[in-house]
Each structure stands twice: as structure tokens, then as C-alpha cells.
Amino acid sequence: MQPLLLSSACCPPAAWFSLVVSHDEVFIDQHEHFVKQTFRNRFSILGPNGKADLVIPVEKGRTPGQPIREVRIAYHTEWQRNHWRSLLAAYNNSPWFRDVEEEIRPFYFRKWEFLFDFNLDWLQTILGLLRINKEIRLTAGFEAIPGRFDNFREAITPKVSCDQWIPGYVQQEYTQVFHDKYPFIPGLSILDLLFNEGPMAGAKLGSYPQY
């Protein structure tokens, strides 16, 4: 199978990780431009009032086409406290919250300067929680991978419906916290799956036809 190229992402959906699992070589493009309203700085959870987006604010004054490596996280609002409260409201009663909490708590009580580093540390933490042993490599230049590769850098995005992300992809359903109020909602952050399925999360990422 060809190497996989993905964009930087913060707690992306299960579909993103299903691609990681299915490829032997995985690259994150560290030379791409930052794109607003993408999973680079946001993710979706399911709370008591339905689906909600948690956005990591970035510093203003960015020039068009700013490299993702140069984007700084903004701390002029208490977004970490607000995100943590949102996660508590959504998942405090989930089966595996206490087990996952210890690993993710630092992301809401420590400050990172750059968004890319924040996302990369999140990725390594989540791979550990999913029990996925996979080396994640960074590109030497924009889309700089020797030979042919599977480019999913812009495929998994909140700008389109999740059923359009990967042709043929099927996310395996599981019991979500508010299943008595809402039907199963696909395309949420991988955190939703981890809080609800714990050690079984890695086996429930979903599948798609191999490329």
C-alpha cells in the first residue's frame, strides 16, 4: 500500500484513525498552510444539548497562507477551562471517562505555544489510548513524500458531511452517552469513541475499501 498523507488535526474523528491503521507509512504535512474551519483546530463532541464544536483559538494577525508550523494558540479567553467543562458535561458519566481523563487532563492545564505541536502531542496520546503502535513521520516539504501516496490531507473535514470523507467508509456504531436522546451520530471526535468504548475503541474505528 502507498504511504498516507494527512493534515495536522486535533482529536479528529474515527475515520482519520482508520486511515492511519490501514497504512504502513503515515505522514503529517508540517509544511502545509493553515486552513480555517477545519479539524486542524476544532473537533466535535456529543453533549446534553446535542453535537457541539470545540474550537482551539489561534492568534490573530495571521497572513494568508501562513504555514501551520507558525500558527500560535491564543489564550486571551479561558478556552481550556471551557473545553474541559464541556467534556465533563458530555462524558463525565461515560463508562471510560475516569480511565481516559488522566491522559488528556494535561491538555487543559498546560499551555502550548504552537498549534502544530499541540496537535502532535494529542495524536501521540490518542494513539497510546487506542493501543496503536504506529510511527508518525513529518514531511520534509509541502506534500514531499517520495513516489506515489494516498493524499487525504483535505478529505476529512467538517466542511462536508462525514459520509463523503472516504468513499465506502462505514463507521461502526457504538453506544453513545446520550443514546436515549439522540440516534447514533457519526463523525464525532475520537474522544467520543474512547470515552464510550475504552480499550475496545481501537477495534471500532470502522472500515473502508482498501486503496
Image (tube, rainbow, N blue to C red):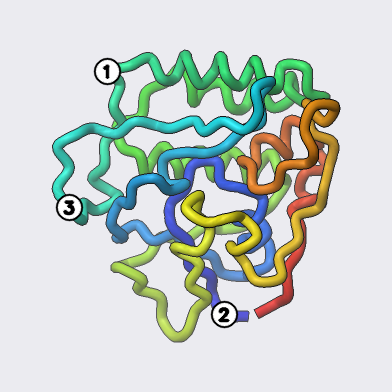
Q: Is residue 3 visible?
A: yes
* Residue visible at 43% across and 57% down in the picture: 7
Rendered-image quadrant of the N terminus: bottom right
**Mark 1 vs 3, N-terminal side:** 3
* Residue visible at 58% across and 55% down in the picture: 161
Q: Residues within 10 Å of mark 3 (few under 14, many from 20)?
A: few
Compared with 94, 172 (above or below) is: below
Q: Is residue 198 visible?
A: no
Towards the viewer: 95 or 36: 36
* Residue visible at 17% across and 52% down in the picture: 64
Compared with 170, 183 (above or below) is: above
Q: CA distance from mark 1 to mark 2?
A: 42 Å
Q: Residues within 10 Å of mark 2 (few under 14, many from 20)?
A: some
- Residue beneath disc 2: 2
User: Mark 3 belongs to which amino acid?
Assistant: Pro
Q: What secondary structure is marked by label 1?
A: loop
For residue 142, the mark is: none
- Residue beneath disc 3: 64
Taking the view exactly as shown, the residue that stands out farthest to the bottom is: 147
User: Mark 2 belongs to which amino acid?
Assistant: Gln
Towards the viewer: 38 or 49: 49
Q: What secondary structure is marked by label 2?
A: loop
* Residue visible at 45% across and 62% down in the picture: 154
Hey, which quadrant is residue 191 in on the image? top right
Q: CA distance from mark 3 to mark 2?
A: 32 Å
Towards the viewer: 156 or 150: 156
Circles 3 and 2, Cβ within 8 Å, touching? The answer is no
For residue 76, the mark is: 1
Hey, which quadrant is residue 153 in on the image? bottom left
